[in-house]
Image (cartoon, rainbow, N blue to C red):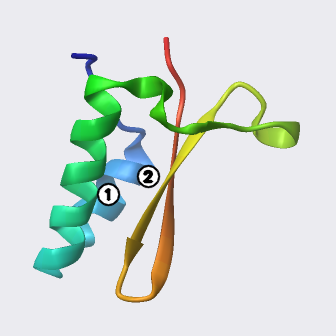
Amino acid sequence: MYEIRFTGAAEKYLKKVKEKGLKKAFQEALEKISSDPYIGELKTGDLAGAYCYDVYYSKTNYELVYRIY
């Protein structure tokens, strides 16, 4: 398993999330990324070198962007 570290902005946002279902969706996504970080899609352009993983919840798409070090 890989260690996940958050930027200050990401940590602040995740603390503000109050809806339990959305929190659970993020937690499941982070567990998947932790076990296999290459599960996400490699980005190009401005985000070159970063991966993204989509989380769908309540008809809304949330995109987790991360880097592997």
Judged from this view, the residue extending furthest toward the top is: 69
Q: Are marks 1 and 2 in contact (CB under 8 Å)?
A: yes
Observer able to see residue 5:
no
Position above or below: 29 against 61: above
State the mark number for residue 3.
none
Res. 63 visible in picture: yes
Horizontal arrangement in the rendering, residue 35 relative to residue 44 (left or right): left
Q: Are there few (<14), some (14-19), or many (20+) residues within 10 Å of tag 2? A: few
Q: Is residue 6 above or below residue 62?
A: above
Residue found at the very far left of the displayed protein: 20
User: Within 10 angstroms of label 1, few (less than 14), some, or many (20 or more) residues?
Assistant: few
> Gap between marks 1 and 2, in whole Å?
5 Å
Please give left or right for residue 67 compared with residue 2 in the image. Answer: right
Percent across and percent down for residue 32 are 28, 38
Q: Secondary structure at mark 2?
A: helix
Q: Secondary structure at mark 1?
A: helix
Task: Pick the residue in front: 4 or 8.
Answer: 4
Q: Amino acid at mark 1?
A: Lys
Quickly name the residue at label 2: 9
Total marks drawn? 2
Q: Residue furthest bottom?
A: 59
Residue type at mark 2: give it. Answer: Ala
Q: Residue at x 42, y 39 (%)?
A: 7
The residue indicated by pointer 1 is 12
Judged from this view, the residue extending furthest toward the right is 45
What residue appears at the point 30 percent right and 49 percent down from the top-left corner? Answer: 29
Residue 13 in picture, x, y percent from top left: 35, 63
Residue at (35, 34) in percent of width and height: 33
| Image point (59%, 35%), residue name | 51
